[in-house]
Amino acid sequence: MMPAWLVVARREFMIRVRTVWFIIVTILGPVGMLGLILIPAYLAKKGADEGISIQVVDHTEDRVSAKFDVDEEKFKIEPVDPATPADVLEKRLRDREIDGYLTLPEDLLGGGAAVYRGANTSNHMLMRVLERAIEDAVLLTRAHRAGLSNLQILSLTAPVKFEK
């Protein structure tokens, strides 16, 4: 003899399992989860394969953007006149002439924030590449201002060996 709660639970389960919605969700649930995982990955890879065009408005005194080191095949970084108004860049973005634009403020070396605007801000690879390029360029500029030679800068920024 089954306990009363188990009889009720079994009956409720059987009623729910026989509904159309249970069957639909059981079949489409995993398909939806795969879509949530695979579609963003596909879009990020597609964007990386096509190449990304970014214009840089550099307001810094030292022209930090000239020190950017990025993969030229995947990223086309093009400096534009610092007097270029934001609406012109926004129009280029809307017209899909460029994928985005990066604004480097005058106080970037003093702690100011670089600002990126583009349709691909959810592309983590792009954001990491831009962040790394800006960090490296600012580091080089600050080191040169401090009077360090290129050899000293290289020795300070040498990668740390890491074994697995």
Image: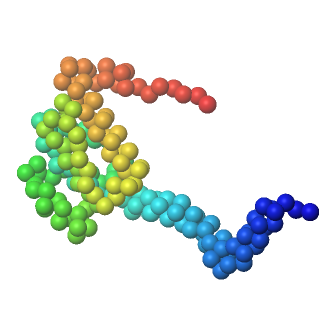
Q: Is residue 73 visible?
A: no
Q: Position of residue 15 (x, y in %)?
A: 72, 75
Of 164 and 22, nearer the camera is 22
Q: Against 35, is 158 above or below?
A: above
Of 80 and 149, nearer the camera is 80
Q: Position of residue 146 (x, y in %)?
A: 20, 20
Instruction: Point out the image quarter for the N terminus.
Output: bottom right
With 157 as the anchor, is 7 left or right in this view?
right
| Residue projecting furthest to the left | 83
The residue depicted at 77 percent of the width and 71 percent of the height is 11
- Which quadrant of the structure image shows residue 154? top left
Q: Position of residue 8 (x, y in %)?
A: 77, 67
Of 151 and 20, nearer the camera is 20
Of 18 and 42, nearer the camera is 18
The residue depicted at 17 percent of the width and 65 percent of the height is 91
Q: Against 19, is 108 above or below?
A: above
